[in-house]
Image (cartoon, rainbow, N blue to C red):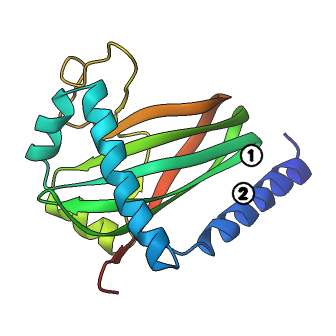
Amino acid sequence: MSFASTTAAAALVAAGCAVFAGCATAPSTRNERDSLRRDADITLGQMMERDPALKGITNAAMAYAVFPTIGKGGALVGGAYGRGILYEAGAPTGYVSLEQASIGAQLGGESFSELLVLRNATDIQDLKDGRFTAGANLGVVVLTAGANANASFDPNASVFVLPRGGLMVDVAIEGQHLKYQSFGA
């Protein structure tokens, strides 16, 4: 890859990040906030229907974030964005936004729901302080028909994904950055 093409690709990724950075963590209207909370509860229920083992996993977690819909797309350079709800000790406490920029072999678009399980106080505080980034070190369980989170569950795995639609070929280097806003803010 030449310097010019590398620079152009980096500029596109930076532009994508700038676009995502402009997105607010919490929805702007009360109806949108209520809808997001309702959708997060419904999504968690759908995930638990798909795999009942998630009930025990979320009960044992210090906190977890549910993203009802994350949209993702790319052609060499890509990105994803979604909003969700953070639950601590099973109770909703605030809004979370997920932003992702990626570069690598990828093509297409997809939507999915995501459950991010946080097992320690440091990760929760990092999320609240805007320092939490999910990356390659986290295991991912895709909740498909017949999948069992306990069968393939690793104590370090933290992400559960429920595919919603679309088609994407993705072999990209990527990280998900999360932002938090409490309900009272």
Q: How many numbered marks, from 0 up?
A: 2
Q: Is residue 73 left or right of residue 178?
A: right
In x, y percent, where is residue 138?
35, 39
Q: In front: 161, or 31?
A: 31
Image quadrant holding the N terminus, namely top right
Badge 1 vs badge 2, beta-carbon distance below 8 Å: yes
In x, y percent, where is residue 7?
83, 57
Estimate how packed mark 1 is, as few (under 14), some (14 to 19) or many (20 or more) residues with alpha carbons within 10 Å.
some
Q: Amino acid at mark 1?
A: Val
Label at residue 13: 2
Using the rendered view, name the quadrant where residue 13 is placed: bottom right
In this figure, which residue is indicated by the disc labeled 1?
77
Q: In front: 185, or 2?
A: 185
- Residue 165: tell me if it is visible: yes
In x, y percent, where is residue 80?
60, 51
Measuring 41% from the left and 43% from the top, which residue is drawn there?
114
Label at residue 112: none
